[in-house]
Amino acid sequence: MKMRTNWVILLGLVLLILENSIVPWLVPPAWSDRLLPHLNFILTIFVAGYAGRHTAFLFGLGFGLLQDLLSYGHLIGPYGFGMGLIGYAAGLLAGYRNFTIVVFSWAVIVFGIMLDSIVYCIYKLFRITDLVYSFVFYWQVAPTALLQLLVALVMYVPVRRYLVKPAVSSGDESPE
Amino acid sequence: MVSAIFRLMRNKRLFILMIGLIVFIALMGFTLGRTRLTWPEKFINDAFGTVQGVLYRPVGAVADFFRDLGRLSDVYKENEQLRMTVAQYTQDQIRFNELETNNKRLQEALDFTEHQKNMDNYRYLIAQVIGSTSNPYEKTITINRGSKNGVKPGMAISTVDGLIGLVSKVKNFTSTVTLVTSLDANTSKGTPVSASFLSKPDSFGIIEYDAETRTLQMSKIDEKDKPAEGDKVVTSGLSSLFPKGVIIGTVKNSQVGDFGLTYTATIEPAAKFDHLREVFVIVVPEVDEP
């Protein structure tokens, strides 16, 4: 299966803008530093599943760096590194396994936790945060991963319908 | 042994991963603690900032409208409170005018220079918030004022309630603001904010944020300035770019500090740090270079 690359990149840009402008208003005030969904991460997993690991790597790297640049307060690079790596890893997984909705859901959860952990480790390495991992996990990583799963499932049908070029058959989850 | 290393090197994936790791660590180290931006960074930030602003502000207005609807019942009580505050203010105004004329007269008598006279004349630049990011360790907001409007890195940002952050990166038409919530003395981020108690202008302390209790900590308070519960804490303005007297919060409780020689106070922040729409950039008058 192939993806419509131009449209995916356009959707990526739109999601990035939405993430910085609309999502903060949708999250209730008490949860505003706990629920921080990364919409482009979800799109990276889609790209990994339908377009292969190399495309996903470049996609994750590019949009990760763009996101780093837009939130540049201390350093540039954590999301660029994390999302590039995760794009490649998810692509590898999609190569071994049939990319069904169950595999996809697990990928969003596990890689979401991985991404936030990588970013945490980088900030810990540069001594920008001194929180302990167990607190960060309970406070931000776990709720964010669950919310990302929800958003990913909402996006699943539209992305498959409009962005994935049907190769063998369209619509249903047939093996390649 | 050597052949094992060679075999490892032949694994292209691992090799690229290592190179990537090195490149990224170099990039992160290089961008850490930098204040000047290159023009592509400024351009990308300004472009995204403008588009974000188009969405962020109307959505914020709608969200605030619905929140206000929910709080409609509190309006009566709030109105009563405000009326009392206004009465208080009119009385204070009379006293303030008298003191100000007195102060001016004395400054003339003592031959204050023009700069010394204008030291406390801060300019409040209103700015709209046009975005906030989803990075948990760099909670930054973007505002629609940049170097073309005279914003400089390190300036204080406040809402009507109190201090919320410092300008960290300045672009041509937008700036990034690091929130007070990412100030931390135990890490390598620098820019400590010094504070004092409103009732004791000579007192001194350093403000940092405690993410686990979601309060501010004021540490290194001198023994003779024992913090009292309910005391207002304001910025002390010891640096040249930082204004004096911006409200930070109120003291919740205090304890003896690390070595028993200083006090540490827990401070309830006065301002809210999320769902922001309008902020002020506080511009301190320029210091003429000697």
Image: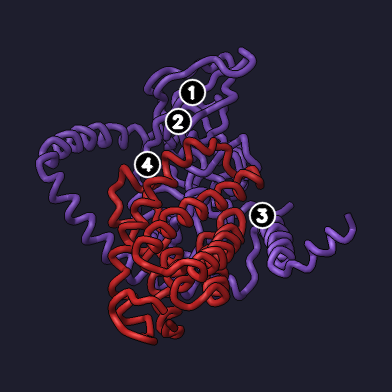
Chain colours: A red, B purple
Q: Earlier in the sequence, mark 2 or mark 1?
A: 2
In the rendered image, residues at marks 2 and 1 fall on the same chain:
yes
Could you tell me the amino acid type at mark 3?
Leu
Could you tell me the amino acid type at mark 4?
Ala
Split into 4 quadrants, where in the image is the C terminus of chain A? bottom left
Residue A84, percent from left and from top: 57, 66
Could you tell me which chain the residue with mark 3 belongs to?
Answer: B
On screen, residue A11 versus residue B140, left or right, reads left
Residue that lies at the very extreme toward the right in this rendered image = B2
For the residues marked 3 and 1, what is the alpha-carbon distance in whole angstroms? 30 Å
Q: Which residue is mark 4?
A: B271
For the residues marked 2 and 1, what is the alpha-carbon distance in whole angstroms? 10 Å
**Circle 1: element type:** strand
Could you tell me the amino acid type at mark 1?
Ala
**Circle 4: element type:** loop
Q: Which marked residue is nearer to the observer: mark 3 or mark 1? A: 3
Residue B84 figure quarter: top left
In the rendered image, residues at marks 2 and 4 fall on the same chain:
yes
Q: Earlier in the sequence, mark 2 or mark 4?
A: 2
**Circle 3: element type:** loop
**Picture residue at 55% right of the left edge, 18% below the top:** B263
Q: Which residue is mark 2?
A: B233
Q: Earlier in the sequence, mark 3 or mark 2?
A: 3
Q: Earlier in the sequence, mark 4 or mark 3?
A: 3
Could you tell me which chain the residue with mark 4 belongs to?
Answer: B
Contact (CB < 8 A) between labels 2 and 4? no
Residue A88, percent from left and from top: 56, 67
Q: Which residue is mark 1?
A: B265
Residue A173 figure quarter: bottom left
For the residues marked 4 and 3, what is the alpha-carbon distance in whole angstroms? 28 Å
Query: Which class describes the residues within 10 Å of circle 2: few (<14), some (14-19), or many (20+)?
Result: many
Q: Which residue is mark 3?
A: B32
